[in-house]
Image (tube, rainbow, N blue to C red):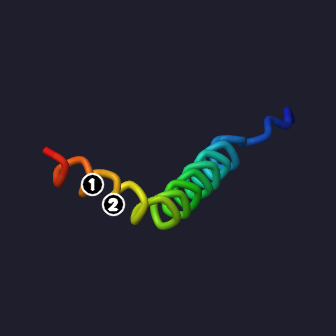
Amino acid sequence: MVFTPQEEGQGLLEYALILILVAIVVLVVLVTLGPTVGNMYTNIVNNF
């Protein structure tokens, strides 16, 4: 009997965790910088 480990599920889980972490980082950056970027665009539009 040959033992071959099944790593497909583990790899999928690792990719899912990385994707979740990237999504959390993007959300934090958008929430933090969102109003600043919005104000910057508003100032640019109002100056023209």
Q: Which residue is mark 2?
A: 39
Q: Residue at x 67, y 48 (%)?
A: 14
Please report the residue visible at 24 percent of the width from the left and 47 percent of the height from the top. 44
- Front in this rendered view, residue 21 or 6: 21
Q: Depth check: 8 or 2 in front?
A: 8
* Front position in the image: 46 or 1: 46
Question: Residue 4's spot in the image, x, y percent?
Answer: 79, 35
Within 10 Å of the Cα at label 2, are there few (<14), some (14-19), or many (20+) other Cα atoms?
few
Q: Which amino acid, by three-letter code, is at mark 2? A: Asn
Q: Position of residue 25 (x, y in %)?
A: 58, 56
Query: Residue lying farthest left?
Result: 48
How many numbered circles does the render carry? 2
Q: Give the residue type at disc 1.
A: Asn
Residue 21 x, y percent position in the rendering: 62, 56
Q: Residue furthest front?
A: 47
Left or right of 18: which side holds 23? left
Please tell me whether residue 46 is drawn above or below residue 48 in the rendered image: below
Task: Answer with left or right where residue 17 lies relative to residue 29.
Answer: right
Q: Secondary structure at mark 2?
A: helix
Please state which of the two labelled residues, at mark 2 or mark 1, is closer to the viewer: 1
Residues at marks 2 and 1, CA–CA distance in whole angstroms: 6 Å
Relative to the observer, which residue lies in front, 30 or 16? 30
Q: Check if mark 2's residue and mark 1's residue have beta carbons within 8 Å.
A: yes
Residue 48 occupies which quadrant of the picture? top left
Residue at 64%, 42% in the rendered image: 8
Residue that label 1 marks: 43
Mark 1 packing: few (<14 Cα in 10 Å), some, or many (20+)? few
Q: Secondary structure at mark 1?
A: helix
| Image quarter (top left, top right, bottom left or bottom right) of the N terminus | top right
Q: Residue at x 48, y 59 (%)?
A: 33
